[in-house]
Image (cartoon, helix red, strand yellow):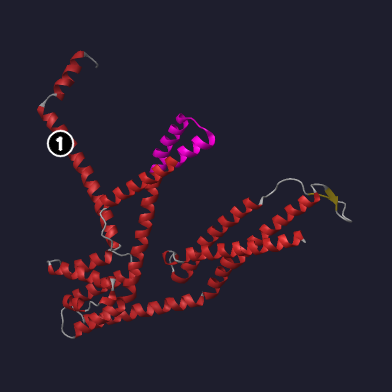
Amino acid sequence: MFSINNIFKKKADALQPERRIEFFKKKYRKAQQKKEIRQERKQKIRDYIERAGLDISPQKLSKTFFNTAVLINLAISGYLIYYFSVTYGITWGTVFASMIVLWIFIFIILIFTLWAMFYLAVDLKIFRRKVDIEEVLPDFLQLTASNINAGMTIDRALWYAIRPRFGVLAKEIEMVAKETMSGTDLKVALEKFAARYDSLVLKRSISMLNEGVEAGGKIGDLLNKIALNIQEQRSMLKEMSANVTTYVIFISFSTIVAAPFLFAMSGVLIEVVHNLGSLLGGTSSVAAGAGLPLTFSGTGVTQSDFRIFAIVSLVLTSLFSAMMISIIKKGNIKSGVKYIPIFMVVSLTIYLITQGLAGKLLGFFFSA
């Protein structure tokens, strides 16, 4: 029941030392949990960057992105102030409101875009490192097997199998060797190395190696069999890729040759119709023998609108075609990232050249 006595009682309870200590303990625990979550998030970002072989501090990266977004916003702000005041004579109040919107929304979008582009670049870098490791893994395993057959222990065999031509794998094995020298178990160090990359080949190889060590079998023969298995799997993938070459050629031809040519011819057709309409002066003529009136008045689709549509369509078609070809040939999209700019540049170049040549022929026809 609500009364003055209850109010004083609650205040007295709030002033009790035990309750105050418990209250501050809860506040401290919540602050510690938030701090641990932030540190864990920073550690994940740091590990993710290290997987790409980059030595960049997340704090320094955040500061760089923040300064870049500020500079871009300053440039945009200066341009908008000059453009609004000179061209339209808009008041400073409107300019100030536009600046507020710019620095609230555009700034956040810029920060998000910069981080997204960075994560995309790092992800592609990690994928490239994974591919490099998988390419040299059979040779490394065979060399390690030779060292084991020569009488070396597994950790020494891994260490002496390192060669500069192994690239990323050599650096990773060096890290594994340093961890084992510092007291870490070899199995734990190898599993940690395999977990850094999303590679089924690497994880299965490390898993079979650890199982072979625990079982006490002939590790040299096991590593040779793993290496041969990886090489056979790679040969099968190459054979499958060769069997679908016809589909790749068809998609490539449709994207970088047929589509630009057809879009250019469609643009020429639109220009021909507009020129005929201007020659006839917007009047209507009766089709011979059909009795149907044909008029050439009205705007319809303009040449500039169709050009924008054609360019956007070619860019999107090139993007998805490169992804399809990557999936067909490699089994994943990331391997086809290099095809995307090539397809875009070639298709747009063919479109512009075809449109320019057709425009000159059309101009020569109407001038004659």
248 above or below 39? Answer: below
Residue 47, image x and y in percent?
26, 58
* Residue 299 seen from this side: yes
Q: Which residues are magenta?
A: 79-107
Q: Quadrant of residue 14?
A: top left
Taking the spot 36% from the left edge, 55% from the top edge, the residue there is: 118
In this figure, which residue is indicated by the disc labeled 1?
25
Taking the spot 31% from the left edge, 50% from the top edge, the residue there is: 64
Residue 367, image x and y in percent?
75, 59
**Three-letter code, disc 1:** Lys
Taking the spot 54% from the left edge, 35% from the top edge, the residue there is: 88
- Left or right, 250 with respect to 78, comes to right
Q: Nearer the viewer, residue 345 or 72?
A: 72
- Left or right, 178 with respect to 68, comes to left
Q: Nearer the viewer, residue 183 or 51?
A: 51
* Residue 259 seen from this side: no
Q: Residue furthest left?
A: 17
